Image (tube, rainbow, N blue to C red):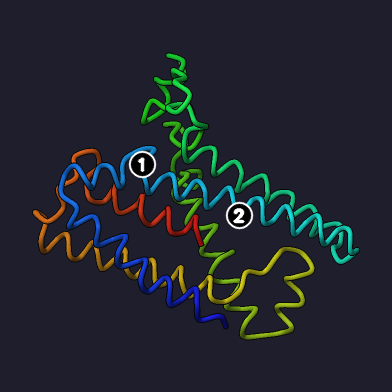
Amino acid sequence: MKWAPIIAALVAIPVAYGALFFLGPGGTDVFAAEDQIVETVGALGLFMTSIFLLLLLIVGRRAGQLGMFKQMSLVGLVLLFFFGAGEEISWGQRYLGVATPTSWEERNVQGELNLHNIDTLSGWLDADYLFRAFWVILGIAIPIAAAVSPRVRAAIDRWIPVFPVWVAVVLVLNQLAAEAAGVLDRRQPTWYEGTYYTFDGARFEVTESILSVV
């Protein structure tokens, strides 16, 4: 297991959540609001992952190392991560100055040009729920199972890419830090001074961004 990413996470994760408590109102909003540092980093993380998976697909296909189903799964993941990057920044509508059509704005919880905030997506189709379920399965459960059993790794790797186990470790650390930040906020609610988001909203943006970068 690679320790460098885990050590980096042990430094970066506390800093990211700690910033919510110590930046003050203006600094916190610049850090966590729409199209600011946290969201932009998350979108870039998703985009770079899609590029990495695309290169993995191209190299593996040329070397004849990928079966048809794994090629299809890689194509699906490339498109999924690219879609996630676009959704994260509402397809750049604020950068480009594109207004949300009225009919769409009325159905979108945040009035944005994206799909994941559509008001009809709830329950099992809720974007946040699907995002977390995706990472629990692909980023935690599968890497741990593959690390425990070489036979399981070989079986799964025939169908989908298997992330290294350090990814699972970092994702678990991220969730533990998010929960710890929530406990701290309940004990010291005056420490968070952001005005754009509630604390839970800002905390989720940080959690989501770290997931995307990993």
Residue positioned 63% across, 46% down in the render: 80
- Amino acid residing under circle 2: Thr
Label 1 crowd bin: few (<14), some (14–19), many (20+), radius 10 Å: few
Label 2 crowd bin: few (<14), some (14–19), many (20+), radius 10 Å: many
Compared to residue 79, the image places residue 191 above or below, namely below
* Callout 2: SS: helix
Q: Quadrant of residue 145?
A: bottom right
Residue positioned 44% across, 20% down in the render: 97
Q: Quadrant of the N terminus?
A: bottom right
- Residue 64, percent across and down? 91, 63
Q: Which residue is mark 1?
A: 36
Q: Which residue is mark 2?
A: 49
Q: Quadrant of residue 119?
A: top left
Compared to residue 133, the image places residue 169 above or below, namely below
- Residue 22, percent across and down? 17, 57
* Residue 134 falls left or right of residue 42: right
